[in-house]
Amino acid sequence: MIGSRQLLSQACRRQLSSLVVAEHDNSHLLSSTLSAVTAAAQLNGDITMLVLGHDSEGVAKQAAHVAGVSKVLHADDPAYGTWVAENVSRAVATVQANGAYSHILAVSSMAGKNFVGRLGAELDCAPVTDILKVVDEETFVRPMYAGNAVATVRAAGALKILTVRPTSFEKAEATGGTASVEIAVPPESGADAGLASFVSESVSGGDRPDLTTARVVVAGGRGLKDGENFKILEKLADKLGGAVGASRAAVDAGFVANELQVDLAVL
């Protein structure tokens, strides 16, 4: 005979559902999103992927083929083309209001971190960032103190907002899925929140892989003395097909740009 506690646990599991916010360039689904899908699959609920973009129908089709995804919600508008945080967070909040998901997952990238904090404020939910492992539906492992410590944390509340460290999870299969594609319900006042506008972007790193998804990272710190010496690491990274990273000390000293910082503050 099944006890009442076990029945309640089973009922809660049936209600689990995850919303994965897809990261892409309006043409291709980024591989980091596949890692977020793997994390969502470990939560044992249905997975919906949200594709926000402009002229991004191809991305929605790619998302529908990802193994494990049961539904794709697609919102296509110029306001979503450059991932302005104010527009993205409001769109995700609207989808959450209609779908009542138990978990919202985003990639732990510059773009993901840019909107997740605002989303947490809108939904009154403190995000759990940079998760390295899913223990269960409310318990996660994440780094602390610039990566020098790892903590197991438990998130209270009906909703959990997570950012996923893509290098800590295997990538879901990009093919084999048969998800349906539906139009996402837009915010009542339109896609553009009117709070910020995109001006321009400057991308560094050339043809090297993104730091958050690179298989190999060649990192240096204050021992290199100045930014000129980072060219030695760049040559090695190019030979290995990897990315270049830097410690916080090297970044604070102005050796390299902020986006190269990795969790290696002891270098």
Image (spheres, rainbow, N blue to C red):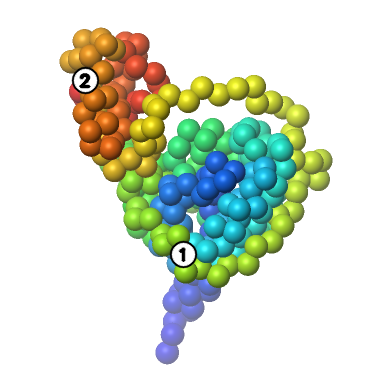
Residue 211: x and y in percent read: 36, 35
Res 48 quadrant in image: bottom right
Does any portion of residue 64 appear in the rendered image? yes
Q: Helix or strand or loop: what does disc 2 sit on?
A: helix
> Hey, which residue is sitting farthest left in the picture?
223
Residue 158: x and y in percent read: 56, 56
**Camera-nearest residue between 205 and 123:** 205
Position of 183 with respect to 169 (left or right) is right
Res 246 quadrant in image: top left
Q: Is residue 84 above or below residue 225?
A: below
Where the N terminus falls, by quadrant? bottom left
Residue type indicated by callout 1: Thr
**Camera-nearest residue between 139 and 174:** 174
Residue type indicated by callout 2: Ile
Identify the disc placed on residue 175: 1
Position of 23 with respect to 186 (left or right) is left
Q: Is residue 100 above or below residue 148?
A: below
> Hey, which residue is sitting farthest bottom in the picture?
1
Residue highlighted by disc 2 = 232
Q: Which residue is drawn at the image coordinates 23% and 14% (left, top)?
A: 229
Does any portion of residue 93 appear in the rendered image? no
**Camera-nearest residue between 27 and 93:** 27
Q: Which residue is drawn at the image coordinates 60% and 22% (left, top)?
A: 200
Q: Helix or strand or loop: what does disc 1 sit on?
A: loop
Q: Which residue is drawn at the image coordinates 81% and 45% (left, top)?
A: 188
Position of 132 with respect to 231 (left or right) is right
Where the C terminus falls, by quadrant? top left
> Mark 2: few, some, or many residues within 10 Å (few <14, many ≥20)?
few
Q: Which residue is drawn at the image coordinates 30% and 28% (left, top)?
A: 244
Position of 215 with respect to 120 (left or right) is left
**Camera-nearest residue between 239 and 253:** 239
